[in-house]
Image (spheres, rainbow, N blue to C red):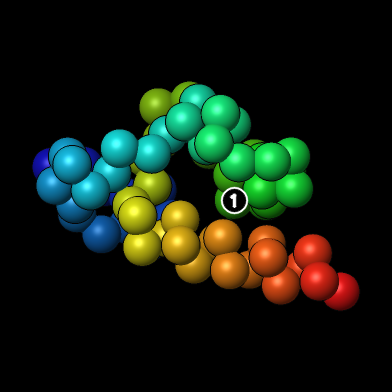
Amino acid sequence: MTNCFVCGKKKEDHEVWWNKIAICITYDSEFQNNEIISNMSDKSMMCHACIKTMEKKVGEKNKL
Ligand SMILES: [Zn+2]
């Protein structure tokens, strides 16, 4: 079990495969520059639900 860096919920290992390195590979600089992402350590894990929420937020920001 791992705690999600963002929501703090306990998640199974398969639900928190995201870490900063994975995010940097998968997402663009806009996403990487997000405050929460910037505060992550290389070992921090984020659950899929939080990634989706953040994806939405960044997407909305890009439209402005
Ligand atoms: Zn989460």
Q: Nearer the viewer, residue 6 or 21?
A: 21
Is residue 10 shown left or right of residue 62?
A: left
Q: Mark 1 belongs to which amino acid? A: Ile
Q: Secondary structure at mark 1?
A: helix
User: Can you give x and y, in whole percent of width and height, for residue 24 in the image?
Assistant: 59, 31
The image quadrant of residue 39 is top right
Residue 44 seen in the figure: yes
Residue in the foreground of this view, choosing between 63 and 21: 63
The quarter in which the C terminus is drawn is bottom right
Q: Give the residue at mark 1.
A: 36
Q: 1 or 26: nearer the eye? A: 26
Q: Quadrant of the N terminus?
A: top left
Seen in the picture, residue 29 relative to 11 is either above or below; the reply is above
Q: Is residue 23 left or right of residue 33?
A: left
Residue pictured at 38% horizontal, 47% vertical: 46
Residue 55 sits above or below residue 56 on the image: above
The residue shown at (50%, 26%) is 21
Crowding at dot 1, Cα within 10 Å, few <14 / some 14-19 / many 20+, comes out as few
